Amino acid sequence: MKNYFPFFLILLILVGCNQQSETMNQDVATTDTTAEEVSEQRTLPDYDPAMDLTIMDVEGIEVLGDTLGVKMYIGTLQPGDSVGWHFHPDHTVYVIEGGTMEVYFKGMEKQTMELTSGVGFISPSLSDAAVNTGNTTIKLLTHDIYRPRE
């Protein structure tokens, strides 16, 4: 008689994965919210919707998506371009095209940053302003993560 244990083990794993996938799909379906509902949930410290970079009149911002409390956008700064004071909730940044940038963080000294293409980082919520002081175009992919705070 053949040993069917490996077959049954694979079958159990596949059934378990399918059930987990269905549960995840149900969770996503029940948490799908509109942009307006997410905006109402954006109760972050110091959050001022008027300081949201993606709704300010700033050239070089391309919003790629805004759903389930995550706003994804690409910001492009040509040499000499600047962006005024704005607010980020918790966020990630991925450097698509690097360069030299002076960044002003609220309550801190100016920082000169050498951004290298292909590098990413995670940051807590903050207010900042920036100037592209180099001679290359800087392109950043940013994910702002809006989570209700207690």
Image (cartoon, rainbow, N blue to C red):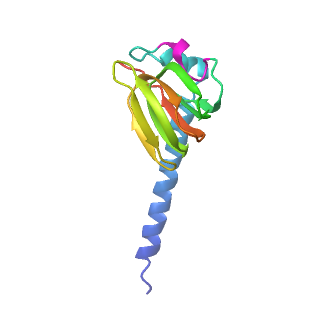
In the drawing, does residue 108 fall left or right of residue 67? Answer: left
Outermost residue toward the bottom?
1
- The residue lying toward the viewer, choosing from 95 and 14, is 95
Which picture quadrant has residue 110?
A: top left
Q: Quadrant of the C terminus?
A: top left
Q: Nearer the viewer, residue 59 or 3?
A: 59
Relative vertical location of residue 11 with respect to residue 29 in this rendering, above or below: below
Q: Look at the picture and state if 128 lies above or below 16.
A: above
Q: Is residue 89 above or below residue 137?
A: above
- Residue 70 is situated, as x and y percent measured from the top left of the image, at 53, 31
Q: Position of residue 74 (x, y in %)?
A: 60, 35
On whether residue 55 falls in the magenta region, the answer is yes
Q: Residue visible at 52% across and 15% down?
A: 51
- The secondary structure that dominates the magenta segment is loop
Q: Quadrant of residue 76?
A: top right
Q: Quadrant of residue 63?
A: top right
30 part of magenta stretch: no
Residue beneath the point at 44% across and 78% down: 4
| Residue sitting at x 46%, y 48% | 119
Residue at image point 48% right, 66% down: 11
Give percent across and percent down for residue 81.
Answer: 59, 28
| Residue 53 relative to residue 112: left or right | right
Q: Is residue 121 above or below residue 65?
A: below
Image quadrant containing the N terminus: bottom left
Please state the extent of the stretch shown in magenta in the rendering: 48-56
Residue 99 is situated, as x and y percent measured from the top left of the image, at 52, 42
